[in-house]
Amino acid sequence: MFRGQRGWFCGSVGQDLRQFWVAEGGTVSDPAVADFLFSCDASHPDTQRIYQSLDYIEDNATVFHAYYLSAVANAEIKTSVALGHFILPPACLQKDIRRKIGSFIWERDEQFPIEKHDEV
Amino acid sequence: STNNCSKMLNYRCSGCIAVGKPLNSRNFTKLLHSCPYQCDRHKVIVEAEDRYKNELRKSLICSKKILLTPRRRQLINKS
Ligand SMILES: [Zn+2]
C-alpha cells in the first residue's frame, strides 16, 4: 500500500503504527523529504516545528493524524480510507474547529486498535 | 466497518472522496484549495489553517523588517 512512500513520524506516534507503515512498504524519513507527515499530537514539539516551517506556511505540508494508518489497517479495502479525514490542524486551532464541526473524525474513531499480527 | 462507511458518505468534497489518487502531505492542502465545493468540515479546517498561516507570514515579515531597519544595520556595522 505504501511502497516507495517516505513517511515522517512525530515522537507522539506509537511504534505499532510505524511498524504497520514499514510492513506496508513505506520508509521512514526526515520531515523535509517525507511524502507523508504523521502525528498523534499537534502540541508535540516535533509537530509544532512542522507548523512553523515554511513548507507549512506555503501549503506544502499537511500533517495527518497517524490514526489514518490504523484505519487503513482495519479497512477491508485499504485504499478506501479517505486520507482527507485525518488532517491534524495546529493545537491552538482545534478548539475553535471543534466548536464549528463537532469532534474530529480521528477522535471518534479512536477505537481502531491495530490488530496484532503474529509475524510482527 | 459499515458504520465508518456511512459516516464517510456524509462528507463529500474532493478532500473527502479523493481516494486512490496519489495524495500526500505535499499536495493535499493545494487540492483542497482548488476544490470548488468544500464540505463544511473541510471548509472550517482550511479557513482556520489559512488564518493561522497568515498570522505566521505577518510575524515573519515583521521580524525581517526589524532586522533590516537602518538603525539596526548601523549598530551591527559598528560592532
Ligand atoms: Zn470534505
Image (cartoon, coloured by chain):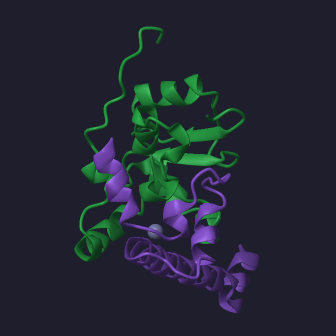
Chain colours: A green, B purple
Counting from the top left corner in percent of width and height, residue A38 is at 50, 45
Q: Determine the image quadrant of residue A93.
A: bottom left
Q: How many marks?
A: 0
Does A13 sit left or right of A53 as displayed? left
Q: Does B57 sit above or below residue A102?
A: below
Q: Which residue is drawn at 65% across and 80% down?
A: B64
Q: Quadrant of the N terminus of chain B?
A: top left
Which residue lies at the image location 28% right of the left edge and 48% below the top edge? B3
Residue B5 in the image: state x and y as whole percent. 37, 51
Q: Is residue A22 toward the left or the right of residue A107 in the image?
A: right
**Looking at the image, is B66 positioned above or below residue A31?**
below
The quadrant holding residue B6 is bottom left
A60 lies left or right of A41 = right
Residue A37, x across and y down, in percent: 55, 48
In this rendering, the answer to whether A113 lies above or below B4 is: above
At horizontal 31% and vertical 31% (from top left) the residue drawn is A113
Q: Name the residue nearer the viewer: B70 or A70.
A: A70
- Considering every residue shown, the one lying at the far bottom of the view is B70
Furthest residue in direction right, as rendered: B77
- How far across and down, in percent of the image, does residue A90 sit? 41, 63
Residue A49, placed above or below residue A40: below
Which is nearer the eye, A63 or A50? A63
Which corner quadrant holds the C terminus of chain B? bottom right
Q: Which residue lies furthest to the top in this view?
A: A118
At 48% from the left and 47% from the top, the residue drawn is A81
Return the residue nearer the eye: A71 or B49: A71
